[in-house]
Amino acid sequence: MKITRSQLKQIIKEEIKKAIYPQPPEGLEEYERVKEEYNLQNVDVEIGADSLDDGPVYFQASIWFEFGDSNPREKGLEEARLEFPIRDILENNRIYPERLDIYGDDVSMVIGPSSAQHQGIEGFHDFMREMYEIDKIYDEVKRELTELLEREGVFQQEMGL
């Protein structure tokens, strides 16, 4: 079988692409489909890629705990300096954010995939399973954070009558 110059160029081009981008060729649509399967309520997973056709897919999760106006304030969240006690609560619940922000009436965080979870669609499934577990305990973690804020005087404790 004889190969034309054009065919050879195409074969070489495809092999180079495989070598440069070892991630399986799943598109963003496949990642979106997996994301939808988990139906997360409190964890927002973001998916993106450098290019729609080639290259790796990137993903991370964002979680917000909003405390809003439901609790009267003694002092602001930012001035309470509670980053380390908040991190302790998160770690006790197996939540390990890359970034934690405390401002206004909110605590927000970004969670990225582990190095093993960067490996294609299977790694994304692992990441989504982890985010699903966090989503299930969201209300409990928020309750623990609220109790911390009450103990530290950020919120006035409700008085039982």
Image: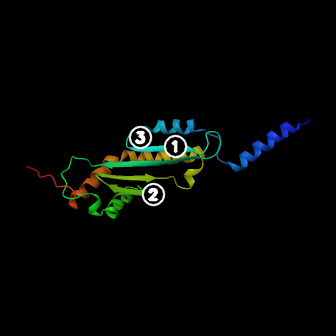
Amino acid type at mark 3: Leu
In which image quadrant can residue 54 be found? top right
- Comparing 148 with 133, the one in front is 148
Q: Which of the two discs, 1 and 2, labels the residue nearer the N terminus?
A: 1
Q: Earlier in the sequence, mark 2 or mark 3?
A: 3
Q: Residue at x 39, y 45 (%)?
A: 135
- Report how far apart the C-alphas of labels 1 and 2 lie in the structure: 17 Å
Helix, strand or loop under label 1: strand
Q: Nearer the viewer, residue 89 or 103?
A: 103
Relative vertical location of residue 47 with respect to residue 111 in this rendering, above or below: above
Of mark 3 and mark 1, the one earlier in the sequence is 3
Q: Nearer the viewer, mark 3 or mark 1?
A: 1
For badge 1, the amino acid type reads: Ile
Image coordinates for residue 85, horizontal then vertical, percent: 32, 63
- Which residue bears the numbered disc 3? 40
Looking at the image, residue 87 lies above or below residue 52: below
Q: Badge 1, how many Cα within 10 Å: few under 14, some, many 20+? A: some
Q: Nearer the viewer, residue 49 or 30?
A: 49
**Amino acid type for the residue under numbered disc 2:** Glu
Tag 3–tag 1 contact (CB < 8 Å) = no
* Image coords of residue 108 (percent x, y): 37, 52
Seen at 80% across and 39% down, the residue is: 10
Left or right of 9 in this view: 58: left
Instruction: Specify whether 96 is left or right of 72.
Output: right
Q: Which residue is mark 1?
A: 47
Position of the N terminus, as image quadrant, is: top right
Q: Nearer the viewer, residue 71 or 24?
A: 71
Instruction: Tell me the tag on residue 74.
Output: none
Residue at the image position 27 percent from the left and 62 percent from the top: 79
Residue designated by label 2: 98
